[in-house]
Image (cartoon, rainbow, N blue to C red):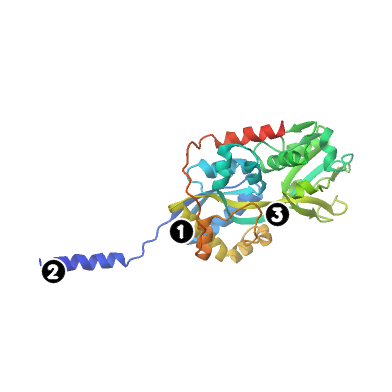
Amino acid sequence: MKYFPKVIAFFLVFLGSISFTYAVDMGIVTGGKSGTYIKIGRDISKLVEQVDINLTVYPSNGSLDNVADVFERRGVQLGIVQSDVLAFIRSSNNQKLAKVANKIKMVFPLYNEEVHLLASNFVTSFFDLENKVVAIGKEGSGTYLTASLLFEIAGFSPKKQLLVGGQDALSKLYSGEVDAMFYVSGYPVSLFSGITEEKLHLVPIVDKSIEEYYVSSEIPEGTYDWQSGVVKTVAVKAVLMSYDYKRTNCQNVGKLAHVIYNHFDWLKSNGHPKWNNVDLDHKLKKWEQYGCVTKALTGNAPKTPEIQDDNRNSTRQLFRDTLKNLSD
């Protein structure tokens, strides 16, 4: 019996020397089932599964819903959103949404998405939309959010705004039911590749007040067969974002970010072509990188204040109600 304590001590030391690994389960909300966001999410999932991170990729209705899901949906720690979603939240003058803005953090900036304003030929500038019927995208979508914010910044509203997007909006533009439509996506947009209607064109968006919130960009000549000349516009940045988690989720998001950063060449070689337009080190205006990501990449995480959560169940509807007030 006198050897028993020594045997126990030996096994404790032995067990302590074993490195246990386990799979991490995470979730990411993206976009439509055939869009770029969901393909980017699937690329990340394929990469991180190699280091035992099971990342489930969920489709979604757009940026607003993605913020709400990361904020309150169990099993979802990541989302892909347009960068202007944060500007919307911060401009809402709503205390609960202001709290959400403080807790939403960037993991990495992704690629630019140009604002396409396709219209009948009698619409020659963005400001011509004031007395027109305009399709601004499905409710909750990134296009819907951006179009609404553009009108808010410019200080006017169209005669009528229809909550339709994609092919439905294009069909209404062909038939004359709407005078113009918005579509936010990195060029070239496959939806516009087959346009044969000579009475349609891309309208430039050039305004100093708008450029305070959006990146100046352009759609190069020849992007579409029917396009004549360069079209100046603005762009939003797609953003991989998370919530200001503590403890386990903090470590997991940091680990995932570390894998993306150190295997970025794999994504460019094996993933969607848009990865070639991504600069992971880009400093995105009005967005703060998640401290757990900074720590994972550099070992120097900035301290963030601890904020206790309260009722989070109605965030999605709150976003939509506030956005409707902007467009009224």
Q: Residue 96 vs residue 82: left or right? A: left
Q: Position of residue 174 (x, y in %)?
A: 82, 37
Pointer 2 and pointer 3: residues touching (CB < 8 Å)?
no
Q: Position of residue 279 (x, y in %)?
A: 65, 61
Q: Quadrant of the N terminus?
A: bottom left
Which secondary structure, mark 2?
Answer: loop
Label 2 – label 3 distance at C-alpha: 68 Å
Q: Position of residue 69 (x, y in %)?
A: 54, 42
Q: Of callouts 3 and 1, which one flags the residue occurring earlier in the amino acid sequence?
A: 1
Label 3 – label 1 distance at C-alpha: 30 Å
Residue 262's disc is none
Which secondary structure, mark 1?
Answer: loop
Disc 1 marks a residue whose amino acid type is Asp
Q: Quadrant of the C terminus?
A: top right
Label 2 – label 1 distance at C-alpha: 40 Å
Relative depth, front residue between 84 and 7: 84
Q: Which residue is mark 3?
A: 112
Q: Which residue is mark 1?
A: 52
Q: Which residue is mark 2?
A: 3
Which secondary structure, mark 3?
Answer: strand
Relative depth, front residue between 238 and 28: 238
Name the quadrant containing residue 121. top right
Q: Of callouts 2 and 1, which one flags the residue occurring earlier in the amino acid sequence?
A: 2
Disc 3 marks a residue whose amino acid type is Asn
Q: Residues within 10 Å of mark 1 (few under 14, many from 20)?
A: few
Relative depth, front residue between 97 and 129: 97
Name the quadrant containing residue 283. bottom right
Pointer 3 and pointer 1: residues touching (CB < 8 Å)?
no
Picture residue at 78% right of the left edge, 31% below the top: 160
| Residue 288 visible to the viewer | yes
Pointer 2 and pointer 1: residues touching (CB < 8 Å)?
no
